[in-house]
């Protein structure tokens, strides 16, 4: 469910995937960006009253490129914005846009909502 307690579980899932895959060099960036994307989805659900689960999918698009996708059913799309120095939020999508090799938001596919995704690793 869209609750902040699940952010840690998402980070640990990605950490475990990378440890099992033998790609430790991607771990720090993948864990940080996962945390930001999942937090954004949970916050969007909380703000819009959406109670459907936030889902995380992670896998390899090829042997060197990791794709992480976070889906939620909250209306609206995430945007990159510039946070003021004293803002306590508003930096997540900026971090994703800066730290990922590729990223985007998809609104097509089965069901309602959108999926924020990012990729790390060099393309083969």
Image: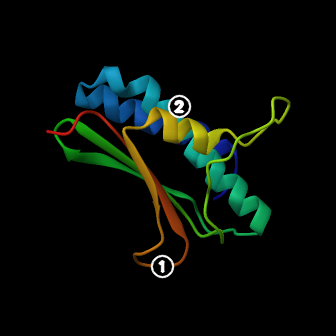
Q: Quadrant of residue 74?
A: bottom right
Name the outermost residue toward the bottom.
111
Q: Position of residue 71 (x, y in %)?
A: 51, 61
Q: Residue at x 48, y 62 (%)?
A: 115
Q: Position of residue 123 (x, y in %)?
A: 20, 39
**Number of dots carrying numbers:** 2
Q: From the viewer's perspective, tell me whether residue 85 is left or right of residue 5.
A: right
Q: In terms of depth relative to the viewer, which is nearer, 73 or 21?
A: 73
Q: Is residue 22 above or below residue 3?
A: above
Q: Position of residue 58 (x, y in %)?
A: 36, 48
Q: Which quarter of the rendering shows the C terminus?
A: top left
Q: Earlier in the sequence, mark 1 or mark 2?
A: 2
| Label 2 crowd (10 A; few <14 / some 14-19 / many >=20) | some
Q: Quadrant of residue 30?
A: top left
Q: In terms of depth relative to the viewer, which is nearer, 43 or 120?
A: 120
Is residue 121 visible in the rendered image? The answer is yes
Q: Is residue 85 above or below residue 43?
A: above
Q: Which mark is residue 8?
A: none
Q: Which quarter of the rendering shows the N terminus?
A: bottom right
Is residue 11 visible in the rendered image? The answer is no
| Label 1 crowd (10 A; few <14 / some 14-19 / many >=20) | few
Q: Residue at x 70, y 41 (%)?
A: 82
Q: Residue at x 72, y 53 (%)?
A: 43
Q: Residue at x 68, y 47 (%)?
A: 81
Per the image, the residue denoted by label 1 is 111
How much space separates mark 1 and mark 2, taking CA atoms?
Answer: 27 Å
Q: From the viewer's perspective, tell me whether residue 51 is left or right of residue 58.
A: right
Per the image, the residue denoted by label 2 is 32
Picture colour scheme? rainbow
Which structural element holds mark 1? Answer: loop
Q: Is residue 22 above or below residue 45?
A: above
């Amino acid at each position: 469910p869209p609750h902040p307690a699940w952010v840690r579980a998402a980070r640990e899932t990605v950490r475990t995937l990378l440890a099992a895959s033998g790609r430790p060099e991607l771990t720090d960036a993948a864990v940080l960006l996962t945390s930001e994307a999942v937090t954004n989805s949970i916050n969007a659900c909380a703000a819009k009253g959406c109670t459907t689960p936030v889902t995380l999918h992670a896998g390899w698009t090829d042997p060197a490129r990791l794709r992480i996708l976070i889906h939620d059913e909250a209306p609206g799309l995430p945007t990159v914005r510039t946070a003021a120095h004293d803002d306590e939020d508003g930096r997540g999508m900026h971090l994703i846009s800066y730290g990922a090799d590729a990223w985007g938001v998809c609104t097509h596919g089965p069901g309602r909502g959108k999926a924020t995704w990012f990729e790390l690793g060099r393309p083969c």
